[in-house]
Image (tube, rainbow, N blue to C red):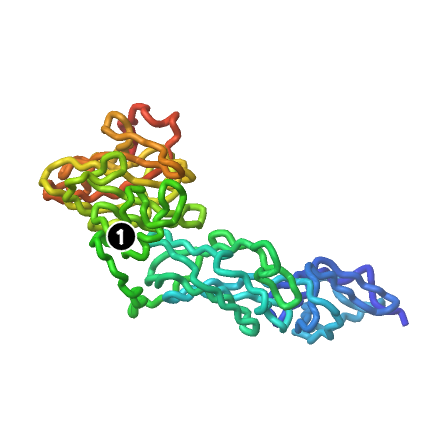
Amino acid sequence: SLGLDAIHTASATDFAVNSASGLAIRVNSLTVDATTKTVTLHLDRDVDSGEAVNVSYTKPAGDNVLQDAAGNDAGNLTKQLVTNNSAADHTAPVLGTATVNGHDLVLSYTEASSLGLNQAHAPGAAAFAVRSTHGPAIGVDSVAVDATAKTVTLHLSRDVNSGEVVNVSYTKPAGNDVLEDAAGNDAANLSNRTVDNLTPASAPAAPSPRLPDTDNDSVPGAEENQAIDPAGAVNGDGNADGIADSTQSAVGSISVATSSSSSTSITLVADSQDGDVSADSAACITSLEQKAPPADLPRALETPIELTSFRATLETVGSSETFSLFVDPATQSNGYWVEDRTGTWVNLTSVPYGGKMATEGERLRLDFQITDGGQFDADGKADGVITAPGAAGHMPLSIVGQAPDPGHDGFWL
C-alpha cells in the first residue's frame, strides 16, 4: 500500500522510447506518482495515432532507481510494447535519405503514421530544384509520390553520371498541393540537401538521346530554342539579331544552373560586333558548357553561374577574336574573368584589355577579345582554335585594380 518511491527514483535518461516509423522520440522528463503507482514519461514529440512504439528501462547504478517505498527495485524493461491511445497525427514527415541513380532522384521520408504521404495533393516539379556542382543544368520533369513507400521520386531531365555531385532543394508552394502526410502535416523545405549518388561506375548511366544540333555548335537546337532574348522573351534568339541561335554556328545558347539552385540562359556570340555576328564571319563555336570553378579561384571572386567554358574556331590562325556573352543582370556580374598563364585572374571586359559591358533590355552584355595562342587562350597554341574557361562574375570594386601581392598567385586586375 506504500506505493512507489517518488523521491529516490530513476531519471529520464534511464528510459528509451522507440517508434517503428524510425522517427526519434526523446524522453524529456518523468513524473512518479506514489499513490497511483504510475511513471509518466514526458516525450519531446506527440506519438501519433496508429504509431507503434515501445519503451525500455535500464536500471542505473546508485540509489536513484525505479523502486517501491520499501526500496524494492523494479526490473529492467526491453522494448515493452506500448498501448497507443493517441487520437490524432501531429508529426510532419521527415526526410530520411536522398539518393539518385541515373535520371531518378528518390526522397525517402520517415512518417509516424502508417497512412504515409498524401498522394492526392502532391507538389509539382517547380517546387523542386536539382543542381550539379560540375555538370550541365538538371531540370525536374515530373514528380511521383508513393504514399505507402513514403517516397517522392523526381524524374530528371538528364541522367546523373557516376561520381557527379548533386544536391536537391524543395520550396513549399502556395496552395494545397504541397508535400505532406495523409493527415495534412507539411514537410519542411530543403535547401541544397546533398544527394547520395548510386549510379554505378561500372555501368554508367545511359546518355540522354542525342538531340539534333543543326548548326554544329555542340548545343542541341531544342536547348538553344529556350534562349532568352534581351526583351526577356524565351524565343531562341539570345542576341536579338532576328536569327534563331540554333541556325548560327557563331552563336550558342545554353541553360546553366545558378548558385541559388535555379537556372538561367546565357548566349555566347563569336566574331561579335556589339552582340551581332559580323556579316562575313567564318567563326564557329564548337563547344559551350558550364563547368565548376577551379579550387584556386580567388575567394573574393563570386561566380553565380560558375565557369562558361567554350571553344571556337577562327578563319585566321593567330588572329584575335571578339566575343559577347549575354547573361542575366541578376548575376550581378561586373566582368568576364579569365586566368592567364601566371595564375592571375583578369577582367577581359575592362578597358585595358579592350573590353566593355553594356545593358541590352533585360540582359547584360559582356564584350571581350582573346588572341589565338595568347595568354588567355587556354590551349596555349596559335592553331586557329581558342579555348577559354572564364567566369561572368562579381569582384568587389574595392579590390579590383589593387596591386598584386608578389607572395601569392591568383590575384586579379
Instruction: Characterize the local packing of mark 1: few (<14), some (14-19) or many (20 or more) Cα atoms within 10 angstroms.
Output: many
Residue at 74 percent across and 63 percent down: it is: 41
Q: Nearer the viewer, residue 136 or 193?
A: 136
Q: Nearer the viewer, residue 291 or 127?
A: 127
Residue receiving disc 1: 246
Q: In terms of image quadrants, where is residue 328?
A: top left
Residue at 28 percent across and 31 percent down: it is: 349
Q: Nearer the viewer, residue 189 or 215?
A: 215
Residue at 9 percent across and 40 percent down: it is: 316
Among all residues in the image, which is located at the extreme right? Answer: 1
Quick one: quadrant of the C terminus? top left
Q: In terms of image quadrants, where is residue 272?
A: top left
- In-image side of 174 versus 344 (left or right): right
Q: In terms of image quadrants, where is residue 305?
A: top left
- In-image side of 184 versus 71 (left or right): left
Among all residues in the image, which is located at the extreme front? Answer: 242
- Residue 4 seen: yes
Residue at 69 percent across and 76 percent down: it is: 81
Instruction: Give residue 94's position: percent from left, percent from top.
Output: 57, 61
- Residue 63 seen: no
Residue type pointed to by label 1: Ser
Instruction: Give residue 86's position: percent from left, percent from top.
Output: 74, 69
Q: Nearer the viewer, residue 314 or 98?
A: 314
Count of number-bearing discs: 1
Instruction: Give residue 401's position: percent from left, percent from top.
Output: 32, 24
Query: Is 315 rendered above or below residue 346?
Result: below
Query: Is 84 rendered above or below residue 274?
Result: below
Quick one: quadrant of the N terminus? bottom right
Which structural element holds mark 1? helix
Instruction: Give residue 70's position: percent from left, percent from top.
Output: 84, 68
